[in-house]
Amino acid sequence: MGDESKAQYWMGFDLGGTKMLAQVYDEDWKVIAKERKRTKPGTSERAGVDRIIDTINDALKKADLKPSDLKGIGIGCPGPIDMDRGILLDLPNLGWEAVPLKEQVSEDLKCPVAVLNDVDAGTYAEYRVGAGKDARCLIGVFAGTGIGGGCVYRGEILRGKQVSAFEIGHIQVMSNGPRCGCGQRGCLESVASRLAIASQAARTAYRGDAPNLLDHSGVDLSKIRSGALSNSISKGDTAIEEIILEAARYIGIAVASAINLIGPDIVVLGGGLVEAMPDLFIPQVFKAANKRVMPAYRDSFTIVPAKLEDDAGVLGAALWAEYQLSDEKKD
């Protein structure tokens, strides 16, 4: 398609539990082509990586580009990541473990690759071009099926020595609370994720305290999604609103701990729950957090809704690749 001396193209890729998405960006970060495929849990690691590569190649074909036209590929994946080596350490939803994704994709496509956690990718996108643009230190908290977090400080994603970090969903906010998928009790994710809220909402509907939700979704957890919860509240199910406000309060408790540790200037809240009910989540999270931080931190931060929504992860992966792989980064 284009001459590399005249244009730079970047690929962003988002690997999810049910779908994978590849998007090609030009030098102005406009999407020029995309390809979406269904993720197939239970396939072998090699078959899964081949499907990732096929999705990338199909997106390139739509853009009339070759892998050699790309300056780099950024891949966002769930779970803990060895960012330096680009290894997916553990993806239980897909049954993968210790997958050398960076090595396999870069060898196949002959293109530089950067791999990062998907929530880190979304947080980085909000830092670069979204709700937290120009922040010194930004925390991202994304509440959906689970709860993930990320932190960017002066342009760098906060991470551990060998693994991605900032698992805010696994801060304990309730002693002896519900069992979390990680094995601990009372983690933020176990009381404030969409799955946790849906479970509480289903019990409430079954008791007859949320008639609108019962009529619309019944007590099937798979049907009690963020939009159904928002619709239930708008039609007068005050018991569901109370569940949401309590979940937001727990998020605020966890955010307060993060503020006391890191002192961000901006906290970005995103994910399906927040997108569906920003007017409930944003003020309640701020109220709970501001009440619990040290006096020196009170009113020193803002909490804002994410701007990029579904594009955050795939765009953030491409932006991180550009930052990591650019000539400026290499000195």
Image: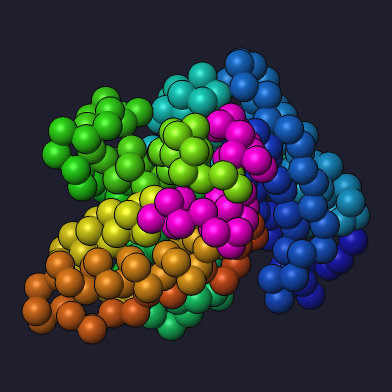
Which residue is at 58% across, 20% downward? 45
The answer, for residue 68, to whether it is visible in the render is no
Determine if the magenta segment contains residue 326: no
The stretch drawn in magenta includes residue 222: yes
Q: Residue furthest left?
A: 295
Residue closest to the eye, 227 or 328: 227
The count of marks equals: 0
Q: Quadrant of the N terminus?
A: bottom right
The x and y percentages for residue 254 are 24, 56
Quadrant location of residue 235? bottom right
* Res. 15 image quadrant: top right
Q: In this rendered view, identify the residue nearer to me: 271 or 73.
A: 271
Which residue is more in the foreground, 120 or 170?
A: 170
173 lies above or below 30: above
Q: Position of residue 36 (x, y in %)?
A: 77, 43
Instruction: Specify how the rendered protein is coloured.
Output: rainbow
Q: Quadrant of the C terminus?
A: bottom left
Vertical placement of 225 versus 9: above or below?
Answer: above
Q: Nearer the viewer, residue 238 or 17?
A: 238
Magenta highlight range? 214-242
Q: Is residue 120 above or below residue 197?
A: below
Residue 141 can be seen, yes or no: yes
Residue at 43% from the left image edge and 75% from the top image edge: 304
Residue sitting at x 33%, y 66%: 285
In the image, residue 272 lies at what x, y percent? Answer: 55, 54
Residue at image position (15%, 67%) is 292
Along the horizontal axis of the image, is 203 left or right of 37?
Answer: left
**Taken as a whole, is the magenta stretch helix, strand or loop?**
helix
